[in-house]
Image (spheres, coloured by chain):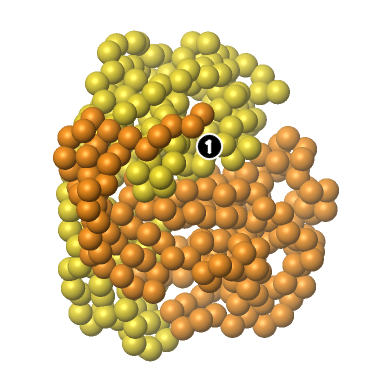
Chain colours: A yellow, B orange
């Protein structure tokens, strides 16, 4: 279905800009033609994430202190692509930087909008397997701890709410559904084994 | 595990404020003690969403033009809580406003951080069943279309990527997993029937 944009933008004013986000306030007419404002946050980098699965059905979580939440968070390896960089290249770099692993097999699991009332942030998430170890090299802002855990245990952490990062939650759930449906890559399904 | 915040905030400057978000730039020392800036977006409202399931196993999607994405989007009923308002009260109001339905049974399915590198936005998502119809009353900014669809079809739209809103994606995935595991509420499982 194609629908014309029912919003009218009368004027847009830059409010804040840094290397990661640009905040703009728009004077608008709403779909009902009433005047209003709309503050938008443009993300300059594509968000990417990867669930790496090793030959024993384990995955690797990254623990880090999230500045914005003022809380510690366990998540799959995630990062921001460089402008124009394909999602796959970006996520391969992140996996290497954060865990030291490279992977021979990659499958895109989903592409989702994270916060579509305010931002255009798009996240693309992958499954990776056939892992080869190397040396991690986290960047300045990151003080990372990497944990190896059976995928089964990570699925439980998603279920219980212990993992709250939505990219990790939706990617873990996606793989779990693929396993239930019998459509996960054979090597991954075999490594993980029965879910319960 | 309790970990002390490894970031140091030297100075915080308000950059933008509207009724929905507050943007602040912080001068920081990163966990590696290097100087930097961090721009954060605080959300003033709790995001809530609900997957309503009727006696025939159908759910209700809301279609609307998303200003920030410049695109039309099909999603479960979603909205923002008022400050201090419990998530359940907020989502009950949203369901009523957007679809006209009230529901006798509610179950919280998940609570997730949507974009934790930049914002503190938290989304709490529910399942609702035992629906009673009424008259919808969307607010000014919304020009909504409501579609009734079998849950099975909506799960397919999530699978194919036709639905990209992450709150809808994770909530539909969660109900599908509950059905696979045999732990969905009996009335919901019976209404939806076999998934494939």
Q: How many marks?
A: 1
Residue B42's quadrant in the figure? bottom left
Whether residue B100 is visible: yes
Residue A117's quadrant in the figure? bottom left
Residue B162 position in % (x across, y down): 47, 53
Horizontal side of residue A127 vs B128, given as left or right? left
Residue B35 position in % (x across, y down): 16, 40
Q: Residues within 10 Å of mark 1 (few under 14, many from 20)?
A: many
Farthest bottom residue?
A: A34
Q: Nearer the viewer, residue A175 or A74?
A: A74
Q: Tell me the quadrant of the picture where the C terminus of chain B can be found.
A: top right
Horizontal side of residue A79 vs B89, given as left or right? left
Q: Nearer the viewer, residue B165 or A95?
A: A95
Q: Nearer the viewer, residue A18 or B128?
A: A18
Q: Nearer the viewer, residue A35 or A65?
A: A65
Residue B50 position in % (x across, y down): 62, 60
Whether residue A89 is visible: no
Residue A49's quadrant in the figure? top left
Residue found at x 38% / y 89%: A34
- The subunit carrying tag 1 is A
Residue B151 position in % (x across, y down): 66, 54
Residue found at x 25% / y 56%: B12
User: Dot 1: what SS?
Assistant: loop
* Residue receiving disc 1: A163
Residue found at x 17% / y 53%: A18
Horizontal side of residue A12 vs A38, given as left or right? left
Residue B168, placed above or below residue A28: above
Residue found at x 60% / y 23%: A152
């Amino acid at each position: 279905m194609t629908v014309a944009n029912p919003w009218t933008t009368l004027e847009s004013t830059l409010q804040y800009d840094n290397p990661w986000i640009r905040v703009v306030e728009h004077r608008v007419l709403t779909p009902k033609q009433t005047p209003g404002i709309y503050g938008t946050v443009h993300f300059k980098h594509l968000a990417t994430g990867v669930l790496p699965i090793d030959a024993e059905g384990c995955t690797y979580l990254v623990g880090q202190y999230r500045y914005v939440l003022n809380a510690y968070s366990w998540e799959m390896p995630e990062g921001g692509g460089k402008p124009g960089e394909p999602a796959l290249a970006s996520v391969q770099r992140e996996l290497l930087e954060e865990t030291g692993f490279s992977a021979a097999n990659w499958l895109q699991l989903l592409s989702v909008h994270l916060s579509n009332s305010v931002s255009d942030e798009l996240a693309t998430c992958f499954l990776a397997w056939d892992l080869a170890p190397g040396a991690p090299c986290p960047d300045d802002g990151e003080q990372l701890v990497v944990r190896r855990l059976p995928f089964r245990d990570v699925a439980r952490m998603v279920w219980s709410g212990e993992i709250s990062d939505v990219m990790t939650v939706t990617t873990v759930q996606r793989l779990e559904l693929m396993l239930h449906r019998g459509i996960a890559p054979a090597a991954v399904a075999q490594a993980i084994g029965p879910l319960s």
